[in-house]
Image (tube, helix red, strand yellow):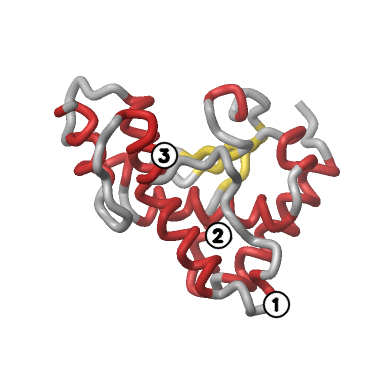
C-alpha cells in the first residue's frame, strides 16, 4: 500500500506541533515508526495506536481529517502509553480484559493531558488544544461503571475499582 500523502503531511505537522508544545517529548516523538493502518480507528482509537516496539499505527483517513492540535494530543497520548510502560505493566494482569485495561490506561493519561491543556490555555501553542468529548477520563469511568476513581491515580487502581464493582 502506498502511503497517503495528505495523511503523511498531517502526521508530520502533528509531530512538529506536539514537539513545539511538549519539547521534552521530542526524542520520543521522533523515535516513533509510523505505519499506516486503516483499521486503527475501528479498534477504538481515534486514529492512532502504538505497540511496545514504538511503532505508531495511524489511520490515514482519520489523521487527515483531524486538526493538527487533535493529532498532536493524540501523539502525546500514545507517547505516554510507551513512557509509562503500559504494555509491560498490563502483563502483570494475566487474563485481564485487554479492552478494559486500555480504557483504564487512557483515563490515566487523559486526566493529565486535560489538566496540562487547561493550565496552559493562555499560552498560544495550547490555544486550541483540549480533550475530545469522547476521550476517557476517571470521571467518565465513574459515570459508566459507578466507581469513585480520582484524577491522578494509576490505571491499575481504576481497573481494580471496576473489577470490585
Mark 3 Cα-neighbour bin, 10 Å: few <14, some 14–19, many ≥20: some
Sequence-first disc among 3 and 2:
2
Pointer 2 and pointer 1: residues touching (CB < 8 Å)?
A: no
Compare residues 104 and 139 and report the one nearer the observer: 139
Which residue sits at x=38%, y=29%? 144
Query: In terms of secondary structure, where does tag 3 sit?
Result: helix
The reply, left or right, for residue 158 in relation to residue 67 is: left
Residue position for label 3:
140
Question: At which x and y percent is residue 158?
Answer: 25, 40
Compare residues 35 and 158 and report the one nearer the observer: 158
Mark 1 Cα-neighbour bin, 10 Å: few <14, some 14–19, many ≥20: few
Which residue sits at x=62%, y=64%? 18
Outermost residue to the right = 6
Which of pointers 3 and 1 indicates the residue nearer the eye?
3
Residue position for label 2:
29
> Quadrant of residue 137 in the image?
top left
Mark 2 Cα-neighbour bin, 10 Å: few <14, some 14–19, many ≥20: many
Query: Whole-Å distance between the Cαs marked 3 and 1?
Result: 29 Å
Sequence-first disc among 2 and 1:
2
Query: In terms of secondary structure, where does tag 2 sit?
Result: helix
Residue position for label 1:
124
* Looking at the image, residue 123 lies above or below residue 68: below
Which residue sits at x=44%, y=38%? 51
Outermost residue to the bottom = 123
Question: At which x and y percent is residue 142?
Answer: 33, 38
Query: In terms of secondary structure, where does tag 1 sit?
Result: helix
Q: Quadrant of the C terminus?
A: top left
Number of marks: 3
Which residue sits at x=63%, y=56%? 72
Sequence-first disc among 3 and 1:
1
* Looking at the image, residue 155 lies above or below residue 12: above
Question: At which x and y percent is residue 153?
Answer: 25, 53
Amino acid at each position: 500500500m502506498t502511503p497517503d500523502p495528505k495523511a503523511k503531511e498531517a502526521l508530520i505537522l502533528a509531530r512538529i506541533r506536539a514537539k513545539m508544545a511538549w519539547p521534552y517529548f521530542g526524542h520520543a516523538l521522533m523515535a516513533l515508526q509510523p505505519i499506516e493502518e486503516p483499521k486503527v480507528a475501528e479498534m477504538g482509537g481515534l486514529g492512532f495506536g502504538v505497540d511496545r516496539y514504538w511503532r505508531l499505527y495511524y489511520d490515514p483517513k482519520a489523521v487527515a481529517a483531524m486538526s493538527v492540535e487533535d493529532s498532536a494530543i493524540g501523539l502525546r497520548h500514545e507517547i505516554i502509553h510507551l513512557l509509562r510502560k503500559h504494555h509491560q505493566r498490563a502483563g502483570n494482569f494475566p487474563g485481564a480484559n485487554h479492552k478494559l485495561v486500555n480504557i483504564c490506561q487512557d483515563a490515566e493519561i487523559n486526566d493529565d493531558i486535560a489538566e496540562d491543556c487547561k493550565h496552559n490555555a493562555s499560552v498560544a501553542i495550547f490555544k486550541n488544544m483540549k480533550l475530545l468529548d469522547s476521550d476517557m477520563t476517571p470521571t467518565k469511568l465513574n459515570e459508566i461503571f459507578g466507581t469513585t476513581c480520582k484524577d491522578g491515580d494509576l490505571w491499575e487502581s481504576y481497573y481494580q475499582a471496576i473489577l470490585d464493582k
